[in-house]
């Protein structure tokens, strides 16, 4: 038969009896109701899959521990697998674990939003070992940075208690939260040279007079102490730097033995 034109189709629909039209509307209602019921069933299934069991607790990612290894279960709490080492757990295939085991259980549990504290200032001081106190220069320098002065004095004195009689420089790093760390440096080369030469101070005119003499062994000993803080590759380079400092103080270095 020849296909009907759209105009004829609309004409046929308009000529349908009210009974046929009512039956068509009823079929449409049944289809809508069935679709809504199907959506409701799917929603209940999804809720049931994501709801934790009654004997579980809230999911909390935990570190891998021994001898009872804990695994973070996504949506199902924290379950343990006793008798398994972290290495054995990491070697297990995902198909051997519950289907809801989170991949995060095998990742580092350190929070990713933790950032290093911001450094606000670096303070350098030269203090007598074991004798730090709130008086200048410690008090004003640390007070301006908001550092706990007494705490620093206590820690510095404890760290330098075995070096009494020496001047130990310190480099203090202050952070935004007012916490601090410090690094002890080696004593100044001038102090070590004065101590080796038995002097209290250097010459005011080192280019015209020599006020003391030290041996090459003493120079090497001082260079070994200062080597970590010097821009030198070896002990010979450090000795050359210390020798230059000695000349500027009017201290002569004995010539090397032939």
Image: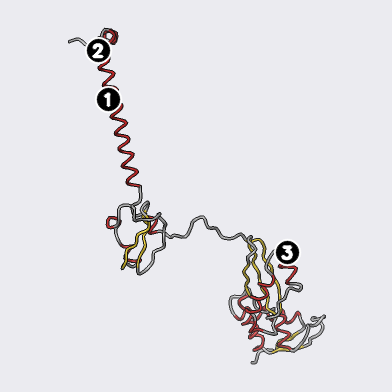
Residue at x-position 32% and y-position 31%? 36
Outermost residue on the front side: it is 54
Residue identifier under label 1: 30
Q: Secondary structure at mark 1?
A: helix
* Image quadrant in which you'd find residue 3: top left
Of the numbered discs 2 and 3, the one sitting upstream in the chain is: 2
Gap between marks 1 and 3 measured at Cα:
80 Å
Q: CA distance from mark 2 to mark 3?
A: 94 Å
Q: Mark 2 = which residue?
A: 19
Give left or right: position of 119 versus 25: right
Can you give x and y, in whole percent of width and height, for residue 112 in the image?
49, 56
* Res. 90 image quadrant: bottom left
What residue is rendered at 64% in x and 80% in y?
160
Q: Earlier in the sequence, mark 1 or mark 3?
A: 1
- Work out which quarter of the rendered image holds the C terminus and state it: bottom right
How packed mark 3 is, by other alpha carbons closer than 10 Å (few <14, some 14-19, many 20 or more), is: few
Work out whether residue 99 or residue 163 is closer to the camera in this orientation and state it: 99
Quarter of the image for the N terminus: give it.
top left
- Look at the numbered disc 2 and give the secondary structure of its residue: helix
Decide which of 170, 20 is in the foreground and name it: 20
Q: Is residue 178 left or right of residue 95?
A: right
Q: Please report whichever mark, 2 or 1, sits nearer to the chain's N-terminal start.
A: 2
Above or below: residue 125 compared with residue 221: above
């Amino acid at each position: 038969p020849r296909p009907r034109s759209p105009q004829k189709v609309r004409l046929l629909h308009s000529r349908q009896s009210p009974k046929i039209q009512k039956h068509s509307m009823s079929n449409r209602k049944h289809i809508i109701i069935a679709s809504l019921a199907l959506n409701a069933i799917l929603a209940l299934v999804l809720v049931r899959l994501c709801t934790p069991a009654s004997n579980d607790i809230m999911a909390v990612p935990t570190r891998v521990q021994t001898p009872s290894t804990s695994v973070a279960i996504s949506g199902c709490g924290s379950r343990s697998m006793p008798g398994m080492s972290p290495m054995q757990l990491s070697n297990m295939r995902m198909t051997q674990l519950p289907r809801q085991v989170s991949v995060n259980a095998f990742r580092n549990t350190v929070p990713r939003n933790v950032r290093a504290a911001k450094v606000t200032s670096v303070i350098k001081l030269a203090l007598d070992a074991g004798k730090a106190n709130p008086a200048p220069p410690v008090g004003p320098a640390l007070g301006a940075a908001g550092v706990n002065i007494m705490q620093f004095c206590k820690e510095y004195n404890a760290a330098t208690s075995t070096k009494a009689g020496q001047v130990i420089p310190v480099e203090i790093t202050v952070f935004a939260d007012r916490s601090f760390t410090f690094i002890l440096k080696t004593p100044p080369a001038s102090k070590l040279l004065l101590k080796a030469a038995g002097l209290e101070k250097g010459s005011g005119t080192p280019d015209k007079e020599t006020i003391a003499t030290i041996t090459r062994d003493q120079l090497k000993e001082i260079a070994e102490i200062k080597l970590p803080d010097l821009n030198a590759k070896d002990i010979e380079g450090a000795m050359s730097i210390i020798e230059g400092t000695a000349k500027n103080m009017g201290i002569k270095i004995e010539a090397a033995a032939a």
